[in-house]
Amino acid sequence: MSQQLSINITRLTDDVTIPAYAYPGDAGMDLRATEHVTLAPFERALVSTGLAVAIPEGYAGFVQPRSGLAIKQGVTVLNTPGLIDSHYRGELKVALINLDPNNFFEVNPGDRIAQLVIQKVENVVWNVVDSLDETERGQGGFGSSGVA
């Protein structure tokens, strides 16, 4: 069994559901809307969750799309992954966008709109050097490994 991290969370409204894992071993916990929003084709909106969290230093929260919404409705998180820094204490909100060219998308209070993943993050100290070590890939960038 993996180790558990305890994080303080606050309900900003009384009827908010605390994020939970759908299945044992899941990485993401569902975030739910607390308001009604209608997204026209290609429209975006910042949707409230009614939650604030105190993520410990050394960790960050990452707001990710729900795969079912993305494939079935064309709705995704606009700035995926949305980053929640450890010192942020405001309300968690989700930037949703409707990429369906024809259909409106209705968000209702209680709807699962995104997933929250908490991950350990390292604090980086840069070492400025004159050149980098050589690798097999080298400077090969986008598409350098092919498609097959």
Image (tube, grey):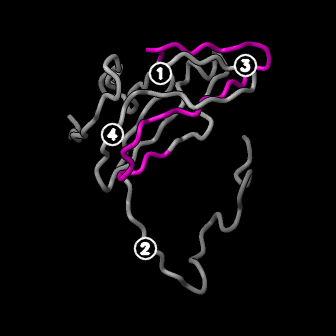
Q: Name the residue under label 1.
A: 33
User: Cα distance, mark 2 to mark 4?
Assistant: 27 Å
- The boundaries of the magenta stretch are 83-111
Q: Mark 3 points at which residue?
A: 40
User: Cα distance, mark 1 to mark 2?
Assistant: 38 Å
Q: Which of 51 and 138 is in front in this view?
A: 51
Q: Where residue 106 sits: x, y (%)?
A: 61, 13
- Determine whether label 4 and label 1 are within 8 Å by CB: no
- Determine whether label 1 and label 2 are within 8 Å by CB: no
Query: What residue is rendered at 34% in x and 20% in y?
Result: 17
User: Cα distance, mark 3 to mark 4?
Assistant: 30 Å
Answer with the quarter of the image where residue 41 lies.
top right
Q: Is mark 3 on a helix, strand or loop?
A: loop
- Determine whether label 3 and label 2 are within 8 Å by CB: no
Residue 101 magenta-highlighted: yes
Tell me: 97 left or right of 28.
right
Compare marks 2 and 4 and give the one earlier in the sequence: 4
The amino acid beneath tag 1 is Ala
The N terminus - image quarter: top left
Q: Where residue 89 sits: x, y (%)?
A: 36, 45
Q: Mark 2 points at which residue?
A: 125
Compare marks 1 and 2 and give the one earlier in the sequence: 1
Q: How many marks?
A: 4
Instruction: Give the class, few, some or many, for how many residues have Cα within 10 Å of label 4's Cα (few <14, many ≥20).
Output: some
Residue 44 magenta-highlighted: no
